[in-house]
Image (spheres, rainbow, N blue to C red):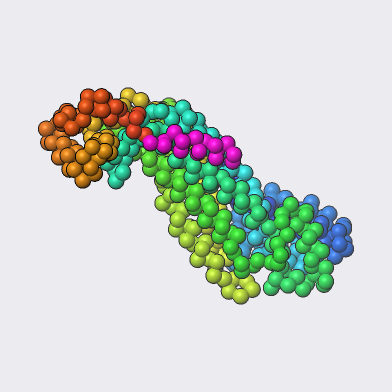
C-alpha cells in the first residue's frame, strides 16, 4: 500500500510482475525470429512462438509458485511456452539469457523515466537559481549561521550535482546490451551459427551486441546500481537542506502548500515535508541495496550461484526508490514556497555577527591579521553577552562609511554570481 508513496507509477509499471514476464517473452519471441532468419528453426515455428509471447496469456501466480521450485521464473515460463507452441522455443539459449536480457529491456524503459524527472527537477532548480540569485540569506556550517550566501547559490549547488547525474544517466545507455551465451557462454548449441543468431537477436531487440556473454561479469548492472545510488544521495542532500529550511524556526523555503498534502491527523497547522520524507527515506534505503549489487559481482566461474539471484529484486527496488525520490522532489520544486520575510529576519538574527569575517578582513589592512582577529573576537563575544549589534562595538576601529559598507550582506557574497552563472550554463549545455 505504500508503493505509490515511494515509487512513481510509471516505474512501478516498468518493474511490475507482468512487465517482468513480458520481458522474458520478448526475448523468446525475438530469439525465435532471429533463429528463423538464419535458418536455425523453421519460420512457421518462430511465428507461432511470437504469437504466444503475450504476458496476458499466462497465470502469473502459477508461474510464481512454479519458480519457487524451479529456481527462476524463466524455467516454468519456457516450459509453458513450449507446451503452447513447439519445440523450437528457447533453442540454444539458457534461462539466464532470457532473464538478463529481459532486465535490460526493463532498464531501457526505466532510464528515460528517470532522465525526464531529473530534467524536470533540474529545470526548476535552474529557475530558482536564476530568480533568487540576489536573495541574500544566512549560509550555515555545522548547523550554525556562518556567512551570507544567496538562495540562488544554494539552488545552483543542488543543480550542479544534478547536472552531473543527468550525464551519468545518459551514459548508462551504453550498458544496455544483449545477453546470449547458452549454458556456459560458448553458444555451442547453435551449431556454428551462434554469432549470427546473436547479431540478429541484438538487432531485433534494439540492444547493443557485447563482445562476449557476461553471465558472471556483472559490472554493467553494478554501474546502474551505483549511478542510481549516487543520484539518490544527492537527492537526499537536497531533501535534507529543504527540510531544514522549512523548520518552523527557520521557515525560509517550504514545499508547496496543497490540499491533502503534508497534513497531520491531529494538528491542523502542520505542513509536513512529504517530498523530503520520501527522498530521505530513499537515501537511507538505497545504499544497502547498492552494497548488495556490489557484493553480488563476485560470481562463480561461468554461471553464478546466489549472487545472480540476489540481483533480481535488488536492482528493480533501487530503480523504484530512485524514481519516487526524483518524482517527489520534482513536484516540490515546481512551485516552492519562498519566504523572503523569514530569509531577511534570519539573516539579521545575530545583529551583524554573520559578517564578523568581513570585519576581520576589513581591519586586517590597517592593524594586521592577528590584531584584527583579536578585536573582532572580543567585540563578537561582547555583542553576544550584551545583546548588542556588532557594528556598535566596532565604531572605535572603523569609520561610519566602512561600517555602512561592511554590514550590508549583499556586499559580502564573493563570487556567488559567477558560480550561479556557471551552474546555469552547465545546465543549459546538458
| Residue 254 location (% of width, % of height) | 38, 32
Q: Say left or right for 221 vs 4.
A: right
- Residue at position x 38%, y 43% in the image: 240
Decide: is 224 above or below 155. below
The picture places residue 362, in percent across and down from the top left corner, at: 27, 35
Whether 416 is among the magenta residues is: yes
Q: Residue at x 38, y 28 (%)?
A: 135
Q: Position of residue 403 (x, y in %)?
A: 24, 27
Find the residue positioned furthest to the bottom: 301
**Image quadrant assignment for residue 404:** top left
Residue at figure coordinates x 26%, y 28% from the top left: 402
Work out whether residue 5 can be spotted: no
Quarter of the rendering occupied by the C terminus: top right
- At horizontal 29% and vertical 27% (from top left) the residue drawn is 405
Q: Position of residue 33 (x, y in %)?
A: 81, 57
Residue 357 in the magenta stretch? The answer is no
Front one among 373 and 410: 373
- Name the residue furthest front: 366
Residue 187 visible in the picture? yes
In-front residue for pair 260/364: 364
Q: Which residue is farthest left?
A: 386
**Number of numbered discs on residues:** 0
Q: Nearer the viewer, residue 34 or 91?
A: 34
The overriding secondary structure of the stretch rendered in magenta is helix
> Is 134 on the left or on the right of 231, as rendered?
left
Query: Residue 56, relative to residue 314: is it above or below?
Result: above
Chain part drawn in magenta: 414-430
Amino acid at each position: 500500500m505504500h508503493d505509490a508513496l515511494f515509487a512513481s507509477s510509471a516505474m512501478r509499471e516498468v518493474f511490475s510482475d507482468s512487465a517482468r514476464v513480458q520481458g522474458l517473452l520478448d526475448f523468446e519471441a525475438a530469439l525465435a525470429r532471429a533463429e528463423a532468419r538464419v535458418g536455425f528453426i523453421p519460420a512457421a515455428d518462430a511465428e507461432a512462438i511470437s504469437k504466444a509471447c503475450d504476458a496476458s496469456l499466462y497465470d502469473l501466480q502459477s508461474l510464481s509458485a512454479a519458480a519457487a521450485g524451479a529456481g527462476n521464473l524463466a524455467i516454468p515460463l519456457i516450459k509453458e511456452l513450449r507446451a503452447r507452441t513447439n519445440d523450437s522455443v528457447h533453442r540454444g539459449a539458457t534461462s539466464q539469457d532470457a532473464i538478463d536480457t529481459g532486465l535490460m529491456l526493463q532498464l531501457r524503459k526505466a532510464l528515460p523515466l528517470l532522465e525526464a524527472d531529473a530534467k524536470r527537477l533540474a529545470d526548476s532548480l535552474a529557475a530558482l537559481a536564476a530568480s533568487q540569485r540576489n536573495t541574500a540569506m544566512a549560509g550555515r556550517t555545522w548547523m550554525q549561521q556562518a556567512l551570507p550566501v544567496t538562495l540562488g547559490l544554494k539552488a545552483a549547488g543542488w543543480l550542479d550535482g544534478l547536472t552531473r547525474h543527468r550525464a551519468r544517466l545518459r551514459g548508462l545507455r551504453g550498458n544496455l546490451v544483449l545477453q546470449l551465451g547458452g549454458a556456459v557462454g560458448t553458444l555451442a548449441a547453435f551449431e556454428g551459427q551462434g554469432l549470427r543468431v546473436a547479431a540478429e537477436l541484438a538487432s531485433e531487440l534494439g540492444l547493443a551486441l557485447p563482445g562476449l556473454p557476461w553471465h558472471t561479469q556483472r559490472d554493467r548492472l553494478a554501474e546502474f546500481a551505483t549511478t542510481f545510488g549516487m543520484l539518490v544521495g544527492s537527492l537526499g542532500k537536497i531533501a535534507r537542506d529543504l527540510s531544514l529550511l522549512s523548520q518552523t524556526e527557520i521557515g525560509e523555503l517550504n514545499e508547496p502548500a496543497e490540499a491533502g498534502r503534508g497534513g497531520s491527523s491531529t494538528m491542523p497547522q502542520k505542513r509536513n515535508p512529504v517530498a523530503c520524507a520520501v527522498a530521505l527515506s530513499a537515501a537511507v534505503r538505497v545504499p544497502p541495496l547498492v552494497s548488495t549489487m556490489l557484493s553480488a559481482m563476485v560470481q562463480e566461474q561461468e554461471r553464478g550461484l546466489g549472487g545472480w539471484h540476489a540481483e533480481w529484486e535488488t536492482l528493480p527496488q533501487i530503480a523504484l526508490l530512485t524514481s519516487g525520490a526524483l518524482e517527489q522532489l520534482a513536484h516540490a520544486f515546481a512551485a516552492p514556497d519562498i519566504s523572503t520575510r523569514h530569509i531577511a529576519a534570519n539573516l539579521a538574527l545575530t545583529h551583524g555577527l554573520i559578517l564578523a569575517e568581513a570585519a576581520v578582513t576589513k581591519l586586517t589592512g590597517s592593524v594586521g591579521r592577528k590584531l584584527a582577529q583579536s578585536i573582532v573576537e572580543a567585540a563578537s563575544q561582547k555583542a553576544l553577552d550584551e545583546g548588542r549589534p556588532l557594528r556598535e562595538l566596532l565604531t572605535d576601529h572603523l569609520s561610519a562609511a566602512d561600517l555602512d559598507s561592511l554590514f550590508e550582506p549583499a556586499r559580502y557574497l564573493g563570487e556567488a554570481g559567477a558560480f550561479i552563472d556557471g551552474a546555469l550554463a552547465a545546465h543549459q549545455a546538458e
